[in-house]
Amino acid sequence: MNDVAHIVSTTLVLSDNDHAGVQNIASPITVMVAADTVASTLTAEATTVCRYEQIVIVGSLNLKYAQIHRPVEFTECVFTDAVDLHYAEFQQPLTFFKCTFLQGFNSGDRTESLTIYHKDLICNHSHFCGPASFNGAQVDGNALFNDAVFAACAHAADVPDVDFIGFTCKGGVEFICTTFKGHVTFNTIECHDAMFSGAQFLSTQGSVDFKGAVMAGNLQFDEAAVGALKQPARFKAGLDGTGIRCGRKALFTGAQFEGPQLVTFERADFGWKLDCRHTLFAGPVSFSGAQCAGDGIFRRAKFTYSQGHDNGDVDMRFFHLQGNLDMTLVRCTGVINLGQALVRGKLKLEGAHFKSKVQLYDTNIKIFELQSYHTTSRFEGFPFIPDSLDLTSCTFERFHAGREGQEQQLAQRFVQSQDPRRFSRDPYIQLEHYYQNNGQEHAARTIHLLGHEAIRQNALRPNGGSINWSRSQKLKDGALKWLTAWGLHTERLLFAALAFIILGTLVFLPAGSLQPVAGSAQGLSLTSFQHFAYSIDRFVPALDLGYANAWQPVGSGRIIYAFIHCVAGWTIIPLYVASLTGIIKSE
């Protein structure tokens, strides 16, 4: 290479203490070059490409404050000591391809930052054995770290092994199939697209930090193609994505969050799509306060944590989606909390299975879908276990549960799966309105009766439910149940009234059973029809046919019955009127 001076042609031998990263070098390295010589060459006034291939750069490469105007390419090179790029400015692309950095790589840290790369920064297949810091660095092109290895681990308790805090890139950043063995932070990183497809985060301590990260395009933690196979993005610890913002999509398809630490996307904005299909969450998860302008897809995702985390093992409170929340075939072991969430499309639960409680209090859903209409096979699984749902103030406009007949059966099972301690009649009312709007009057009446019966059974539970009734309230409700079916079967009152009127006719029909009131009907007798009219006059309140005031029963038994007859009328007739006007039903 013409640009390299003072080349020492000798074989390089590294001891075991010189870090294990050298073993990844494909070709034998036989040339060593002093770092100062390399620095002088890079900073020289030249515009030709400066290339270094298969050499060892000995000593610290100090390019602090350097202005480098030429393209620079390092291929399969080894840097024995630290690389310092503080405040350096690269006018052309800088490439480290299959390079090994045995000590630290500093392109900006917490005290001194702002290294500027006006073109691309390429570190594909490189191996960083020591701490690597790109804090505050600025790349005007793309930043590529595909298949790189960051091997440092816990070099200092309060300093991350890999630091991309405040890193900005006008193009895309790529960490496809990159391996991070230590603690890494991307706090407040800004770029167009961020691709971590197939990336491996192997530290079991803490969480990968993406707080406040901003992507104008996509954020990808999906699977990467490795030959004929697919390699998922893998996290041995948690991830902190609080406040992440994506302009287009956030893709976590097939990602594996294997550690017990929290994975959080609180207050995140996922742009037009959040895709978590086939994703594994082994620890607690939070999407609290997150939003998405399109669909949130969790099809076949697995949530295996079940330790009673605060606000639910899967916290989706205040999760706002303008599209669908697709949880088809989801498996969730712990408590999932969708309280006060907003889903303007469908909440799709076909084939899902929740092994613990599901909280849907104050949730607003446009279409609640247990099974889609187009499904042809018989529904083989119900998502919820008994006594697991909190549906307080849960609202939805439509309810889908497969074909007619099957839908009503699953709807009833759905509302009957409520936790007795958090029982609410709200879902019954929602279903009743839905069926009424669809002209399914029989289904609406059925669900109305089930709602009343459910609230009654909750109030009568031996161990106590969420409804507390006084004894008088229980008696009153029992009477309404048997007499009117809570306002839906008013014909029962008609039958009861007719029965009393006929019975009264028979009681007062025998000769001598009635006698005229003094001065009203002396010497007259009643026909059979008039006895019937007398029974009606006694029974119906505020009805004056003239018979009840002119005649009175004879004998203590008939007098007692006349009192009962009158009381029954004052009870049944007002109930019938209330049923007709809908007063009882509304209660």
Image (cartoon, rainbow, N blue to C red):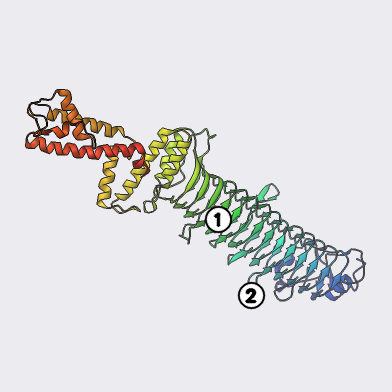
Q: Relative to the observer, which residue lies in front, 358 or 304?
A: 358
Q: Relative to the observer, which residue lies in front, 124 or 93?
A: 93
Amino acid type assigned to the residue bearing label 1 in the image:
Phe
Residue occupying image coordinates x 71% and y 58%: 175
Alpha carbon of mark 2 to alpha carbon of mark 1: how far? Answer: 29 Å
Residue occupying image coordinates x 90% and y 70%: 4
Q: Is residue 310 above or below residue 248?
A: below
Q: Which residue is mark 1?
A: 281
Residue 419 coordinates in the image, percent (x, y): 39, 51
Foreground tag (2 vs 1): 1
Residue occupying image coordinates x 10% and y 37%: 559
Report helix, strand or loop for mark 2.
loop
Can I make out residue 253 in this image? no
Apparent side of residue 490 relative to residue 348 in the rendered image (left or right) = left
Q: Earlier in the sequence, mark 2 or mark 1?
A: 2
Apparent side of residue 319 relative to residue 132 in the rendered image (left or right) = left
Residue 13 coordinates in the image, percent (x, y): 78, 71
Amino acid type assigned to the residue bearing label 2 in the image:
Ala
Are there few (<14), some (14-19), or many (20+) residues within 10 Å of tag 1? many
Residue 236 coordinates in the image, percent (x, y): 59, 61
Report helix, strand or loop for mark 1.
strand
Residue occupying image coordinates x 71% and y 49%: 227
Can I make out residue 469 in this image? yes
Q: Which mark is residue 41?
A: none
| Residue 255 lies in quadrant | bottom right
Quadrant location of the C terminus in the rendered image: top left
Residue 99 coordinates in the image, percent (x, y): 78, 64
Q: Which mark is residue 156?
A: 2
Q: Could you tell me how many numbered marks the image carries?
A: 2
| Residue 443 lies in quadrant | top left
